[in-house]
Image: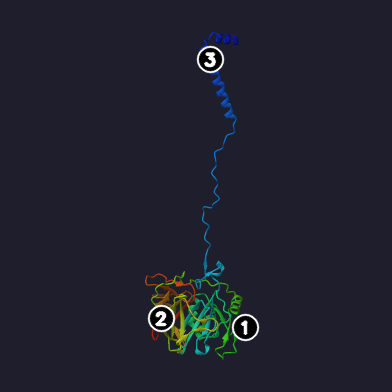
Amino acid sequence: MSISGMDILSGFKNLSKKQKMMLILLGFIIILTSGFMTFFALQPKKEAPQKPISTKNTKKAPKPEKFYASLSGVQVGSAKEVNKPVIGVMIENSVPARPQSGLNQAEVVFEAVAEGGITRFLALYQQNQPELIGPVRSLRGYYLDWASGFQASVAHVGGSGDALARIRDGNHRDMDQFFNANSFWRAQDRYTPHNVYTNFTNLSSLNNSKGWSSSNFQGLNYKDEAKNTAPSVSQIQINLSGHYYNTSYSYNPECNCYLRNQAGSAHLDREKGQIQPKNIVALRVEMGRGADGYHNVYSTIGSGSGVVFRDGVAEEITWEKSSEGSNIILKNQNGQQTKLNRGQTWIVAVPISGGAISWQ
């Protein structure tokens, strides 16, 4: 059934006045509502505010890697410097040889009594490059034992029969002045045999010419330095043979180092002043006579006791060296490797019979 417009109009006329008003009002409301809905529908939608994107990097930047020299434990600039070749030099300590050159820049020094109560040094270099080193003297077998633990080349002027036989066997890094004279010279202000000198540049060139480009070994155990505010040891006395070769050390808290004295006065490096290592390692060792009845020999392979001085304190230790090619290991009373300060370490072979170590 369909409803025409006339029917709607006729129906509207039949409504009461009140009904007509209600119907008109309802129509007005419908039209108004429709208009509002259309208006809001046509308005652009507002997007929800976006959270700002943080530009802050939440990950911490990795700390730059640190590298430490295998010989002295000092920080170096790159990995290739860690195992640079170690060069050892035999340096004389008789009275006419004093003051020596290059000792203050040595990174590790071994000291022992050679013949006639006279001490001699094996100075090891890796990062430091002295312009003058000497006087250079002859080699002994026990120094070769210590040098081999650092896979070091050894510069020397001849040596005892057993030392020369060993270092020339093709398994060692030999830099004998007898066969490499151009790398050494004789000074005019000293008399023979106390006047053979060299420098790091010459020895490094000689080392490179032989193809010895690195030294790979187990180094000593080093730590970052921390000054001791209450040092308990200020004076060290190490007796090796007699007045001219006995040594003492005075602890200096300012540099956290030990001022070395010899024969009752400061032991000087001619160019760099008083020698002042960071660590003193006194090894108790057996000393005897070699097969020739003249040259000393030491119990360098095996184990023994000793004392480490660093940071103004004394620490009783044990030392171990299992073979010529292995390095010395220093252990504390708990069986752990004792830690040394980064820098120069002075290692002294103190004869159990005739030598003495004391401190206060």
Percent from the top left, x then y, of residue 354?
Answer: 39, 86
Which numbered circle lies on residue 182? Answer: 1
Q: Nearer the viewer, residue 172 or 130?
A: 130
71 vs 181, nearest the viewer? 71
Residue name at image x 58 percent, y 10 percent? 9
Disc 2/disc 3 C-alpha distance (Å)? 120 Å
The relative height of residue 15 versus residue 357 in the rendered view (above or below) is above
Q: Position of residue 213 (x, y in %)?
A: 58, 72
Mark 1 residue element: helix
Q: Disc 1 versus disc 2: distance between alpha carbons?
A: 43 Å
User: On the rendered image, what quadrant is the N terminus found in?
Assistant: top right
Which label is found at residue 235? 2
Quarter of the image for residue 240 reads bottom left
Looking at the picture, does residue 10 appear above or below residue 173? Answer: above
Locate residue 322: give its quadrant. Answer: bottom left
Secondary structure beneath dot 2 equals strand
Asked if the residues shown at circle 1 and circle 2 are in contact, with their CB atoms under 8 angstroms apart, the answer is no
- Mark 1 burial class by Cα count in 10 Å: few <14, some 14-19, many 20+: few
Q: Position of residue 272 (x, y in %)?
A: 54, 81
Residue at point 60%, 79% (across, down): 202
Q: Specify which label sits upstream in the sequence, 2 or 3.
A: 3
Q: Earlier in the sequence, mark 3 or mark 1?
A: 3
Q: Nearer the viewer, mark 3 or mark 1?
A: 3
- Sequence-first disc among 1 and 2: 1
Q: Look at mark 3 in the image and give the residue it sits on.
A: 21
Identify which amino acid the numbered label 1 is placed on.
Asn
CB atoms of marks 2 and 3 within 8 Å: no
Residue type at tag 3: Met
Q: Residues within 10 Å of mark 3 (few under 14, many from 20)?
A: few
Query: In the shown orientation, is residue 181 left or right of residue 331?
Result: right
- Where is 171 relative to 246, above or below? above
